[in-house]
Amino acid sequence: MDDADADDVIDDLFAVIEDRKENLPEDSYTTSLFTHEKGENAVLEKLGEETTELILAAKDDDREELAHESADIVYHLLVLLSMKDMDVEDLRSELSKRR
Ligand SMILES: N=c1c2ncn([C@@H]3O[C@H](COP(=O)(O)OP(=O)(O)OP(=O)(O)O)[C@@H](O)[C@H]3O)c2ncn1[C@@H]1O[C@H](COP(=O)(O)O)[C@@H](O)[C@H]1O
């Protein structure tokens, strides 16, 4: 996968998250995060847990687990940005400023 494809995956995932926020389809984990009273806390807890799991995977040199936990973190991070009415562009521009 080249960089452009990786970028598309993140944009596509963010678009799905925004769609869940707007349309609230049933049987969607993302919807449940937006609708549950404690959804934001659940996202923050997940980010904490997944970061710990990521650290353990890195210490174990477990590349497969590292990729799995990285994806979990990116997903929950994008949900958090959406909850705060931020955009994946905010992340992109912050990263770009650091070049
Ligand atoms: N990327 C994700 C994603 N990553 C994690 N999760 C969910 O987050 C929940 C908690 O994740 P955990 O990693 O804690 O769960 P776990 O795998 O049991 O725990 P560990 O293996 O990490 O210990 C699980 O129900 C996962 O399914 C995700 N749920 C959805 N997405 C994306 O969001 C899209 C829309 O999903 P829905 O809103 O459910 O339709 C999907 O097509 C995916 O692209």
Image (cartoon, helix red, strand yellow):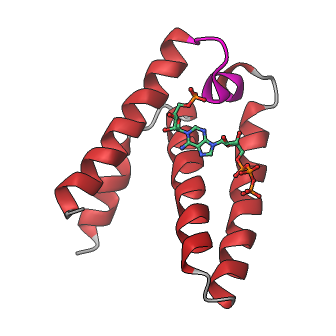
Q: Position of residue 59 (x, y in %)?
A: 68, 89
Is 62 placed above or below 52 here? below
Tell me which segment is drawn in magenta: 24-33
Give the quadrant of the N terminus: bottom left
Q: Is residue 70 left or right of residue 9?
A: right
Q: Quadrant of residue 63?
A: bottom right
Q: Position of residue 61 (x, y in %)?
A: 61, 89
Is 70 placed above or below 56 here? above
Q: Nearer the viewer, residue 71 or 38?
A: 71
Report the residue at 75% width, 32% height from top. 39
Q: Quadrant of residue 11?
A: top left
Report the residue at 59% width, 54% height from top. 72
Is 42 placed above or below 24 here? below
Report the residue at 22% width, 75% height from top. 99
Q: Is residue 86 left or right of residue 75?
A: left
Note whether residue 89 is visible. Answer: no
Report the residue at 58% width, 12% height from top. 24
Q: Position of residue 43 (x, y in %)?
A: 70, 43
Number of callouts in the render?
A: 0
Image quarter for ligand 1 equals top right
Q: Position of residue 58 (x, y in %)?
A: 62, 84
Q: Is residue 84 left or right of residue 27?
A: left
Q: Is residue 10 left or right of residue 26?
A: left
Q: Is residue 78 magenta?
A: no
Note whether residue 15 is visible. Answer: yes
Q: Is residue 28 magenta?
A: yes
Q: Nearer the viewer, residue 1 or 79?
A: 1
